[in-house]
Image (cartoon, rainbow, N blue to C red):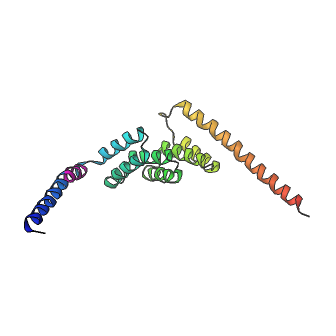
Amino acid sequence: MNNKIKRTLFCIGVLLITLLAINVAPSFSEDEEKTPEDFFLKGRELHDSKKYSEAIDSYTRALDLKPNFIEAYYGRGASYGMLGDQELAIKDFDKIIELNPGDAQAYYNKAVAYEIFSDFVKAVEQYKLFLKHSNFQTPVDLTQKVQRKIEKLERKIEAEKKALEENKKNKTSAKP
């Protein structure tokens, strides 16, 4: 290959690298300038657009910059829940409770996640903690709804216990 072709290819390569650097650099510096609140708001926007995985990424970026950002834990927990990952949702709600033990809404969200898991005993426990930590700002209809939900779940738990006992009796009586 002659020198003229080599120089041309070299120049094209340098030009491509320069163009790439120009396109990459502004987006990188823009991210560097973003605040935790910017990432949180982007996460909320993505969540509202049903882009839950992207929302989780944005909330996580907010938490990387501000580890005690309760609202970002709420958002990420809700996004995990919408993706069906109740276990990670519960971890985020646990973190909120760790940061603010009197946060009634975190207990409520955790109860809902346990209910989805069909862990009714833990759901009832969390609903009761929600009621315990509720205050005058909690809407009365929500408090009443939770009380009815607890009663319903306790009946379900009792029915499951009876069904298990019946099943044990049937297995025991079926043995020769």
| Residue in front for this viewpoint, 145 or 33 | 33
Is residue 11 shown left or right of residue 51? Answer: left
Is residue 30 shown left or right of residue 138? Answer: left
Residue segment shown in magenta? 23-31
Give the main secondary structure of the magenta stretch.
helix
Residue 85 horizontal/vertical position (percent): 51, 51
Residue 48 horizontal/vertical position (percent): 41, 38
Which residue ends up furthest to the left in the rendered image?
Answer: 4
* Image quadrant containing the C terminus: bottom right
Residue at 45 percent of width and 46 percent of height:
79
Residue 139 horizontal/vertical position (percent): 51, 31
Is residue 161 shown left or right of residue 74? Answer: right
Residue 26: say if magenta.
Answer: yes
| Residue in front for this viewpoint, 6 or 47 | 6
Which residue ends up furthest to the front in the rendered image?
Answer: 1
Total labels: the figure holds 0
| Residue in front for this viewpoint, 158 or 77 | 77
* Image quadrant containing the N terminus: bottom left
Residue at 49 percent of width and 37 percent of height:
135
Residue 63: say if magenta.
Answer: no
Residue at 34 percent of width and 41 percent of height:
41
Is residue 81 shown left or right of residue 12? Answer: right
Residue 38 horizontal/vertical position (percent): 29, 44
